[in-house]
Amino acid sequence: MGAHLAHHALKCEGRGGETMQCVSYNIQYGIGLDKRYDIARIVDAVRGADLIGLQEVSRNNPNNQGRDMPAEIRALLPDYFSVYGPSFEIDMGSHVKDGKAVDLRFQFGNMILSRTPILASRNLLLPRRRSVAKMNFQRSVLEALVETPLGPIRFYSTHLDHRSPDERLTQIRHLMERVLAYPREGGGLTGVGEMGFPEPPRPESAVLLGDFNLLAGSPEHEQITGRLDHEFGLPLVADKFVDAAAYLGTEADTCVDIDHPDDVSRHKRIDYTFVTADLAERLKSCNVDASAIGSDHRPVWVELK
């Protein structure tokens, strides 16, 4: 079976509700390895998943002729619920036309789409430092509470700094604090019984997925998973996450050098799915779709049973 057909079979398996397919994809504002914008091939690469986490989704981006990517993605996946969380907005030529103000702002952030309704969401802004000479921009993590076939789970579409391990460590510590505090704090809104609505669940189960811009075994990776013990390996504990690919032994490169796509020595694994310890035994598979060319990253598929 060819790589594309095999991956299509993987996506279609488990439609009976016994498993859940999640996919993460940094779509590099729609620009593929051939340096063309093609949102349809990106959507085709994630179609069929129960939960989709996307990074580098933009509006009014000069690098892709100002496409409204959230709207285009929604149009191609009309049967999915979605939320979009821009990390920042920058004016790109707002003006007055025919007596009306026209807002034209560059937005850049993360997106989550789900087959089942998204019960609550919020955008978590991550710490950053002002850079000099080289660009550094606000990073964020989009949180979505979803009622899944496996019960309520929190999903986090994540995009960390690409320049500095120190900045990534600061961002990870901040993110872990927020994620682990959720059962106690209740996310973005609590007490909605006052308005006649049921209180959203506060599950401990959570999935971090996205472009973490870090390497396995680095201090940033260990901040998420914990450090390997010389005898007992990595214990499953409530305040650390499990690297799905490492847990299943299916690690593979997820990022390609767009200027040297055929040079495998330049390929890296920097996109991950991390799950809370209670979900580790539910991990069934974790695979990278190496056939996708819609970005310089590759989709990472995880199946939960």
Image: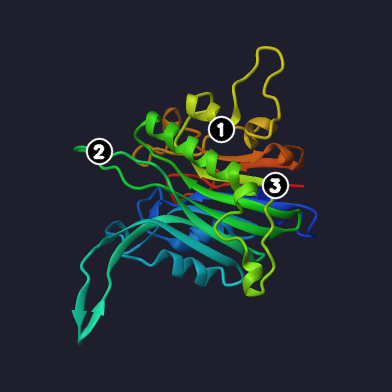
Q: CA distance from mark 1 to mark 3?
A: 20 Å
**Along the line of sight, which residue is nearer the eye, 144 or 8?**
144
- Looking at numbered disc 3 in the image, what kind of residue is underneath it? Glu
Residue 73 is situated, as x and y percent measured from the top left of the image, at 49, 66
Label annotation for residue 210: none
Q: Residue at x 60, y 41 (%)?
A: 180
Outermost front residue:
194
Q: Is residue 265 left or right of residue 304?
A: left
* Disc ID at residue 131: 2
In this rendering, does residue 4 appear at all?
no
Residue 32: image x %, image y %? 41, 51
Count of numbered circles in the view: 3
Crowd rating for badge 2 (residues with CA inside 10 Å; few <14, some 14–19, many 20+): few
Q: Residue at x 62, y 19 (%)?
A: 228
Which residue lies under the disc numbered 1?
224
C-alpha gap between disc 2 and disc 1: 25 Å
Viewer-proximal residue among 269 and 235: 235
Residue found at x 62% / y 63% = 191
The amino acid on which the numbered mark 1 sits, given as a three-letter code, is Ile
List x then y, in percent, for residue 21: 68, 52
Badge 2 or badge 1: first in the primary sequence:
2
Q: Which residue is mark 3?
A: 303
